[in-house]
Amino acid sequence: MPLGAYLTLAALVFAIGLFGVLTRRNAVGILLGIELMLNAVNINLVAFARFHADLAGILFTLFTISITVAEVAVGLAIVIVIFRVRRTVEADHLDLLRG
Amino acid sequence: MTARVGADDLALLVLGLPFASFLLLALVRPLRRSAPAAAVVSIVAMALAFVAAFLTLQGSVRRGAAVSPSTTWSWIPADGGPMATVGVMVDELSMWMLLLVTLVSLLVQVYSWAYLADEPRSSLGRYYAYHSLFAFSMLGLVLSPTFLQMFIFWELVGLCSYLLIGFWYDRPAAARAAVKAFWITKLGDLGFVAGIVMLWSVTGTFDFWTLFTMGSMGTLPVEALPPIMFLIYLGAVGKSAQFPLHVWLPDAMEGPTPVSALIHAATMVTAGVFLVTRAFPLFRLTPDVLTLMAWVGACTALLAASMACVEADIKRVLAYSTISQLGYMMTAAGAGSPEAGFLHLLAHGVFKALLFLGAGIVIHVFHTNDVFRMGGLRRQAGVWLPFLIATLALAGVWPLPGFFTKEAILADVLEVRRWGPFVLLAVTAFLTAFYMFRVVFLAFFARPHGRRHGEPHVPLAMSAVCWLLGALTLALGLQQAFLSGHHEAGGPRWLPWLSLTLAGAGIALAWAMYHRGAIAPARVAALLGPIDWMARRRYGLDALFAGLYRGLLLALARLIGWIDRYLVDGVLNVLSAWTLRAGDRLRGLQTGQPQDYVYGVAFGALLLFVLAHWRLR
């Protein structure tokens, strides 16, 4: 399969993730969208590593996955704390930063 | 040469003692809060200063006219000699002034101790601190060898006058009078400071002795001098309460009576006369200013005397008489003989202080300033005899000092053929005797009004000071009458008889009107209708100044206030309002919704892509 196919898949996954981030009202759903976007990047990295025969891309992917795990842990913890305090995780209601 | 150094050191001591006392009282709080300690510090310092002033006069040696009597130190250094110097000028003039100032200050401070015994202790400490500061400033003014130093002390005495008039600052009248005195004298001071700056710009020096030397050598730019000397004279007009800036002095009587005696009769108000006397070698070169000085002085003397005749407040009568006598001194200077004016200043300082201190006792006894509600004080011999001596001295009766000094002034005015001022002064002499004896007859000889609770108690310190000053007045008069032949005063032979007749006529008229009741005062007032009407309204001058103040100054202030509020502040207010409004509009962008920010980021990234693509193409 040519590189273009992988890149197209990555772009699709990224777009789906972005769509999720933009449209989901639930904070957990937004986190899921972010995960999709990150994984699209991983696909890109692996594809380029494979086609350029460069291990650095794969190494970066390993780092990204571990960091993503940590990020999800922190993100979910924040969401739980927000739920405890505000009794909601609806993004529309979380507007403390409004000017 | 050693005696010379001694005189300077003594003069510095005279200057330093009151200043040290002021510093002690101002900085050491427990001292200020305890009235007896404050009084003792101040009085002891003043007594030592008096002794030092006396020794200065004793130890002085007559020097040749070519030797400068001033010792100066450089103050503002500059290329080619210091730009300004400070120092002391110890000559006949300043030594006599030192003696007068320290003597009257000392006596007034002793008197104040009894007079203000009912005051709260802390404010008495404040009173003595101000008094010490005043003594320092006045002595500094007297000793100044340069115009600049004199101006500094000149403003300091003005400040002390303001502080002491407003001593009872919780009384609205006193606070108002203090402000009025301050800013009306400032009008004159503006002229003074402009004058000395102009003088400096044409001669390059503030130093009296240098200027005098230049004057006598003829190197002074005489054509530039008249406006300069006129401006400097304006300072003297304000300080010495000459027409039309005299309106502050009667109001200044709101201060405590001892303050009036010291500052507004004996010393500070004579600073203007002293200035003219000190700078006379320069004034001599400007005959036009001298003519003006003589006329203004004589008019002041007559106007003030006429106002004193209709005044009921005993202190204000004395204030008007002070203005009137200052007019005499200025006329003498204007007639070219400041020495006569200066002698009158010294004698006047002594007996006018006595009059005020006596009036203080009278007010202390009656609890009123109104002469028509006094009377029957004749039994209090301790009070009325010194007061009578001072009154006779002021009225100009032989052999008291007022007679000789006034006659010397009249003789000098006559000698230069200034008939106008001479006639004005002669009428003033008559009025002086009249209004002073009006007070004496009403306060001391009239039947007592109302009941008084037993015999009034007059503290010993107060009557002792009065007696001392009375004895001094008498001694001065007798000394002039019998020891130093006053025939050298000059003037035609009929002059003493004229002044005695005028004084006698004034006394007789007062006796007929206010003691005997032979002439009803109301009828005299009706006879002199317009003059009486005008004098009672103070010739409209107070109203004029009040009108100028309200109409001109306040209107200007309002205009400037409008410009400040609506133009200067307006521009800034509009700018800040616009900024605020713009911020208010922009803050709608910050919705606080994370997804809106993600939209922003996504569109931004898209935009960057498009731009990059477009650029690369």
Image (cartoon, coloured by chain):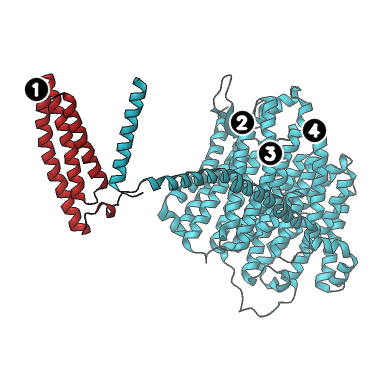
Chain colours: A red, B cyan
Where residue B120 appears, as percent x and y from the top left, is 49, 64
Tag 1: amino acid? Leu
Q: Name the residue under label 1.
A: A55
Q: Mark 3 points at which residue?
A: B192
Q: How far apart are marks 2 and 4 (CA)?
A: 25 Å
Q: Which residue is drawn at 56% across and 44% down?
A: B136
Q: Can you tell which mark lies on residue B615?
A: none
Where residue B509 appears, as percent x and y from the top left, is 85, 65
Q: Which residue is drawn at 84% across and 50% down?
A: B425
Q: Nearer the viewer, mark 1 or mark 2?
A: 1
Is B550 on the left-hand or right-hand side of B487? left
Q: In this view, does B117 lie above or below B517?
A: above
Q: Mark 2 lies on which chain?
A: B
Tag 2: amino acid? Ser
Q: Which of marks 2 and 4 is in front?
A: 4
Residue neighbourhood size for the residue with mark 4, other residues' Cα within 10 Å, grouped as few (<14), some (14–19), many (≥20): many
Tag 3: amino acid? Phe
Q: Residue furthest bottom?
A: B451
Kindly check if marks 3 and 1 are in contact, taking CB atoms under 8 A apart as contact: no
* Closer to the camera in the image, B122 or B533: B533
Q: Name the residue under label 2.
A: B70
Q: Nearer the viewer, mark 1 or mark 4?
A: 1
* N-term mark: 2 or 4: 2
Q: Distance between the residues labelled 3 and 1?
A: 95 Å
SS under mark 1: helix
Q: Mark 4 points at which residue?
A: B286
Residue neighbourhood size for the residue with mark 1, other residues' Cα within 10 Å, grouped as few (<14), some (14–19), many (≥20): few
Residue B162 seen in render: yes
* Closer to the camera in the image, B410 or B573: B573
Tag 3 and tag 4 share a subunit: yes
